[in-house]
Image (tube, grey):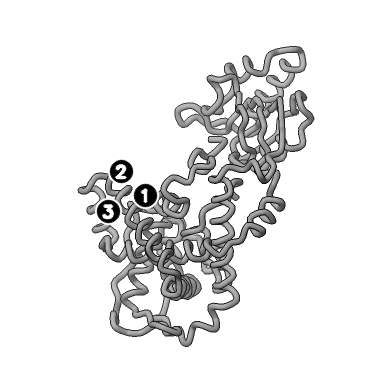
């Protein structure tokens, strides 16, 4: 799909909760990591608390459950080190949060769990938790801490910070009306075509358009974009940041109005587009949801900054159990510790588990 409906300015209950819920469902078939060898051993101490080996193992299971792409890295030393630091950050920040942030964190965590039960049904939900050797209370505690920390940091974002972020990313708020013809590499019922085959079709479509064919009719006949094909490839008054493809967004922003583009490549295949209109959205015209997305993105950035620059002064000692040298077999067995978030890689590691994405979905 060319754009992500879940990121199309819809916060739902909360952008944090939505991202976490989606991650939980995506990881539901993965098995948890191994059992602890010394559950009571303290593996980390920090100002105000400590983490035991049992708590670390629970954290590993939760991360593996929520983010299956990390399952093959879960026992590596760098990854464990990062998980411990993330757990410390969430625990410390949530303990220092305002009472209103704590209440909101509890509320959001409960809503995520309730929504997942509703979506899956009680029996399947319980079976999936059991498959991970998790109980709901452990999952809830993680969500409460993460969301409380997020809520508290977000509450500290100022109006000026929101405005500055908007100015730095204002092209994502451009509103455009356009037609798109996509010749996809994967199309129909699991069919595939090569890049050369897709480009050949795209060039043929462009030739017909140059000879006067209507782009809406060409989209209905040739396009593999399921979101717009039946509507003649039309995207009417779409915010540019809703589109996933960097190449697609660049074309929308630079293509002269009413000019039909040459075929250009994205991860999906080859596109031909025509932009009918394009206009900026002034800051004072942003919706409350759009401003909320910016605010939450900045709140996540504050947590990243804390992890990179202040956490080292909070941690007193980390003494992790010996980690696996190589990942387990499977599709991701070729991954190595270089793929894991490093100790200072707050922006990457935090955002991939909790951070709500901004309008561009970057």
User: Going 45% across and 56% down the picture, which residue do you hit?
Assistant: 69
- The residue lying toward the viewer, choosing from 27 and 164, is 164
First-in-chain label (3 vs 2): 2
Q: Residue at x 29, y 60 (%)?
A: 132
Question: Can residue 210 be seen here?
Answer: yes
Residue carrying label 2: 119
- In front of the other: 156 or 142: 156
- Disc with the residue nearer the chain's start (3 vs 1): 1
Classify mark 3: residues with Cα within 10 Å, few (<14), some (14-19) or many (20+): many
Residue receiving disc 3: 128
Label 2, residues with CA under 10 Å away: few <14, some 14-19, many ≥20:
few
Name the residue carrying label 1: 25
**Picture coordinates of residue 73 (x, y %)?**
45, 65
> Helix or strand or loop: what does disc 1 sit on?
helix
Q: Nearer the viewer, residue 267 or 151?
A: 151
**Residue 253 shown left or right of residue 235 in the figure:** right
Could you tell me which secondary element the residue under label 2 belongs to? helix
Which residue of the protein is positioned furthest toward the bottom in this rendering? Answer: 316
The answer to whether residue 164 is above or below residue 39 is above
Q: Residues within 10 Å of mark 1 (few under 14, many from 20)?
A: some
Q: Residue 84: x and y, percent?
A: 44, 75
> In the image, residue 54 lies at what x, y percent?
31, 76
- Distance from disc 1 to disc 2, alpha carbons, whole Å, reads 10 Å
Q: Is residue 284 left or right of residue 115?
A: right
In the image, residue 90 lies at what x, y percent? 44, 70
Residue at the image point whose x is 77% and y is 24% from the top: 259
Residue 323 versus residue 107 in the image, above or below: below
């Amino acid at each position: 799909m060319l754009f992500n409906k879940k990121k199309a300015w819809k916060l739902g209950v909360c952008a944090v909760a939505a991202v976490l819920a989606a991650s939980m469902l995506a990881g539901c078939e993965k098995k948890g990591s191994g059992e602890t060898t010394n559950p009571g051993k303290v593996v980390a101490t920090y100002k105000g608390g400590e983490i035991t080996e049992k708590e670390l193992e629970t954290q590993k299971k939760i991360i593996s459950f929520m983010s299956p792409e990390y399952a093959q890295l879960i026992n590596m030393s760098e990854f464990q080190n990062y998980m411990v630091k993330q757990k410390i950050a969430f625990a410390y920040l949530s303990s220092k949060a305002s009472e209103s942030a704590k209440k909101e964190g509890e509320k959001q965590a409960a809503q995520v769990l309730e929504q997942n039960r509703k979506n899956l049904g009680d029996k399947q939900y319980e079976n999936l938790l059991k498959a991970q050797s998790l109980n709901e209370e452990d999952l809830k505690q993680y969500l409460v801490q993460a969301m409380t920390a997020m809520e508290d940091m977000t509450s500290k974002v100022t109006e000026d910070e929101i405005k500055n972020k908007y100015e730095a990313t204002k092209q994502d708020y451009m509103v455009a009306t356009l037609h798109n013809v996509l010749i996809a590499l994967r199309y129909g019922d699991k069919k595939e075509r090569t890049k050369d085959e897709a480009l050949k079709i795209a060039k043929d479509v462009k030739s017909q358009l140059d000879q006067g064919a209507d782009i809406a009719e060409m989209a209905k006949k040739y396009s593999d974009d399921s979101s717009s094909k039946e509507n003649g490839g039309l995207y009417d008054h779409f915010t540019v940041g809703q589109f996933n493809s960097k190449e697609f967004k660049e074309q929308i922003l630079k293509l002269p109005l009413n000019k039909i583009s040459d075929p250009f490549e994205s991860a999906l295949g080859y596109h031909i587009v025509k932009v009918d209109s394009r206009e900026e959205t002034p800051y004072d015209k942003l919706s409350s949801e759009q401003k909320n997305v910016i605010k939450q993105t900045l709140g996540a950035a504050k947590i990243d900054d804390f992890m990179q620059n202040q956490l080292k002064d909070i941690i007193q000692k980390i003494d992790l159990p010996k980690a696996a040298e190589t990942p387990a077999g499977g599709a991701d067995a070729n991954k190595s510790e270089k793929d894991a978030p490093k100790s200072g890689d707050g922006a990457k590691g935090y955002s991939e588990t909790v951070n709500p994405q901004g309008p561009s979905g970057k």
